[in-house]
Image (cartoon, rainbow, N blue to C red):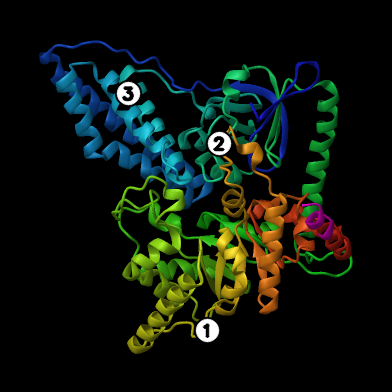
């Protein structure tokens, strides 16, 4: 198992994905994966009507519970996080789902709990097999809702995190949104799960609540028992089961140091992210949800280097129109003023689509019809967003960025559509930004290798290192069999980053990094030495990265990069 190492004296070290930084040591509480045991029995034809009535009553009760959770989350974390539960309500109200359960009741003559499990398992298997991270992780929505319906049918209470009374580290196969909604930060000191990734609900909620979290550990819920001691490092994604006394002492000191550093970093948030020899490297934020914008000042981020707009579309019953989008982008920019906001156009396509858009079925959506490819194939749809961004940018510090650029032609076509939108808005007499900085996201090797050709047509580059590494090394970092080959410092990756930097600087345009590498303290000096002009990361990572920058010399970073390129 590539993500497991044996330490001394029986300790077990597992490597997962750190999705929310921080270190925690504590006693574990393991949450059951499946909840109550589901009965499975044959029923008579005359019992079907009563089973349907039971099912409908459970749906009503489940809907009420979800609405209550949604209100709680709205109060604690804001509307954006509460919107997650709209997907849960859609499952409860989905006529196709409900009718499939009723159809199977008639056909199979089994009790409704068993039929519900069969139908739900089919949905979960289908979603879990998709290539796209976002939709694969939506299987957790179906699992959570159907588990709740099933427990309401059986009459059993679900395990609830808000019922915990003693400080602990919560471990589960997977945490549902309703699980994390009940987290009390004074009780739950870390979240650890077998499943999940950077865009999972666990990750998003943990970051919002500033609780350390590690996911993607495969089977930790089976390897550890409630009451055992667990060490969690949400920064590097490492957890240690039954840590030795020596490791506990070392990490206890790290926890103390971390708390002291966090306190100290708050005093540094308004200081420049400048090396000891005067080289300035802006630290800006990647934003997943609008509610995260309010944390920019708290952490000292000087703007938004990547604002993801998919949330507007994937959680909506209907596509947001131009007016709604323009108002939304204006609000974000006004909140960040005078700092810049880089709005990434939609990274949709393949199997990552709003329900209101139809698309083709693809064998490998990860390499398919998505992002800028999808948008250019749907110019009317794309122009709605372009017009909204142009209108929002009038008098505001907004830039636009195209995702997953592969060829120069894609940039040219996108810019032509942008110009068409300008002309339309001019004719209509609507205010818009005459000059709008345009950037290309470099996350495909072909774009990195031809960055010199693309550079004259854009105003900046932003390197998405997560996908660039995966595409360059042909490694899915979520695949346990090959994840050990996911190497940010592989020579080929470093050379591609350097090539993009040189191409950008030759045209006098800045080059940013907006992937996970930017939030890894040990890699920041290397990125600075490679010539990267700006680092964009989760807001909570900004203080630590700023501190790293303030404690290195630019000249030493350059030497480090030269050595790494030579050895690679």
Badge 2 crowding class, 10 Å Cα cut-off, few under 14, some 14 to 19, many 20 or more, is few
Q: CA distance from mark 2 to mark 3?
A: 27 Å
Q: Residue at x 71, y 63 (%)?
A: 498
Which mark sits nearer the N-terminus, 3 or 1? 3
Q: CA distance from mark 3 to mark 1?
A: 55 Å
**In the rendered view, would you say 509 is above or below 558?**
below
Which mark sits nearer the N-terminus, 2 or 1? 1
Q: Is residue 238 left or right of residue 136?
A: right
Q: Quadrant of residue 115?
A: top left
Q: CA distance from mark 2 to mark 1?
A: 43 Å
Q: Assign the magenta stretch its main secondary structure.
A: helix
Q: Is residue 65 left or right of residue 2?
A: left
Which mark sits nearer the N-terminus, 2 or 3? 3
Question: What span is in magenta?
Answer: 562-568
Q: Residue at x 42, y 46 (%)?
A: 364
Front residue of this view, candidates 566 and 192: 566
Q: Is residue 393 left or right of residue 5?
A: left
Which mark identifies residue 435? 1
Q: Position of residue 501 (x, y in %)?
A: 69, 68
Say if mark 2 contacts mark 1, CB within 8 Å. Answer: no
Q: To which residue does mark 3 refer? A: 117
Tag 1, which secondary structure?
loop
Q: Position of residue 482 (x, y in %)?
A: 60, 36
Whether the magenta-drawn stretch holds residue 129 is answered as: no
Q: Position of residue 485 (x, y in %)?
A: 65, 40
Tag 2, which secondary structure?
loop
Q: To which residue does mark 2 refer? A: 479
Q: Position of residue 355 (x, y in %)?
A: 31, 50
Closer to the eye: label 2 or 1:
2
Q: Is residue 236 left or right of residue 154?
A: right
């Amino acid at each position: 198992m590539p993500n497991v190492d044996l330490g001394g004296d029986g300790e077990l070290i597992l490597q997962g994905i750190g999705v929310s930084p921080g270190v925690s040591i504590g006693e574990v509480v393991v949450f059951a994966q499946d909840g109550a045991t589901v009965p499975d029995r044959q029923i008579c034809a005359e019992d079907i009507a009563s089973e349907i009535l039971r099912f409908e009553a459970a749906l009503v009760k489940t809907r009420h519970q979800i609405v209550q959770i949604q209100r709680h989350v709205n109060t604690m974390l804001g509307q954006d996080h509460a919107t997650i539960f709209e997907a849960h309500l859609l499952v409860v109200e989905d006529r196709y789902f409900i009718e499939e359960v009723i159809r199977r009741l008639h056909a199979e003559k089994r009790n409704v709990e068993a039929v519900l499990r069969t139908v739900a398992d089919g949905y979960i298997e289908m979603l879990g097999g998709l290539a796209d991270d976002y939709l694969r992780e939506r299987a957790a929505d179906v699992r959570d809702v159907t588990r709740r319906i099933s427990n309401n049918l059986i009459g059993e209470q679900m395990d609830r995190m808000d019922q915990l009374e003693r400080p602990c580290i919560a471990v589960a196969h997977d945490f549902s949104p309703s699980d994390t909604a009940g987290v009390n930060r004074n009780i739950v000191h870390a979240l650890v799960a077998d499943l999940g990734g950077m865009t999972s609900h666990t990750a998003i909620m943990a970051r919002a609540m500033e609780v350390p979290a590690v996911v993607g550990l495969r089977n930790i819920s089976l390897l550890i028992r409630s009451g055992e001691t667990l060490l969690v490092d949400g920064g590097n994604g490492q957890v240690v089961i039954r840590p030795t006394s020596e490791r506990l002492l070392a990490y206890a000191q790290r926890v103390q140091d971390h708390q002291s550093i966090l306190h100290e970093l708050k005093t540094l948030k308004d200081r420049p992210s400048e090396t000891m020899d005067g080289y300035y490297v802006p630290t800006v934020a990647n934003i997943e949800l609008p509610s995260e914008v309010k944390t920019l000042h708290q952490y000292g981020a000087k703007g938004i280097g990547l604002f993801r707009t998919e949330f507007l579309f994937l959680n909506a019953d209907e596509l947001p129109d131009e007016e709604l989008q323009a108002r939304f982008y204006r609000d974000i920019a006004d909140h960040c003023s005078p700092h810049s906001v880089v709005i990434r156009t939609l990274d949709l396509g393949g199997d990552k689509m709003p329900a209101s858009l139809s698309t083709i079925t693809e064998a490998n959506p990860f390499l398919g019809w998505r992002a800028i490819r999808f948008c250019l194939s749907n110019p009317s749809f794309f122009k709605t967003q372009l017009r909204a961004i142009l209108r929002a940018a009038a008098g505001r510090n907004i830039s636009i960025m195209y995702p997953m650029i592969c060829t120069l032609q894609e940039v040219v076509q996108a810019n032509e559509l942008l110009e068409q939108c300008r002309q339309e808005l001019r004719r209509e007499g609507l205010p818009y930004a005459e000059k709008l900085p345009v950037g290309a996201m470099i996350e495909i090797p072909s774009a990195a290798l031809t960055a010199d050709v693309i550079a004259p047509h854009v105003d900046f580059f932003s390197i998405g290192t997560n996908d660039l590494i995966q595409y360059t090394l042909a490694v899915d970092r979520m695949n346990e069999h090959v994840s050990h080959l996911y190497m940010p410092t592989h020579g080929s990756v470093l050379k591609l980053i350097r090539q993009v930097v040189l191409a950008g600087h030759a045209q006098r345009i800045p080059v940013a990094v907006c992937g996970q590498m930017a939030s890894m303290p040990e890699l920041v000096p290397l990125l600075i030495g490679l010539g990267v002009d700006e680092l964009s990361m989760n807001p909570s990572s900004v203080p630590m990265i700023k501190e790293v920058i303030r404690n290195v010399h630019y000249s030493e970073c350059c030497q480090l990069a030269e050595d790494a390129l030579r050895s690679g």
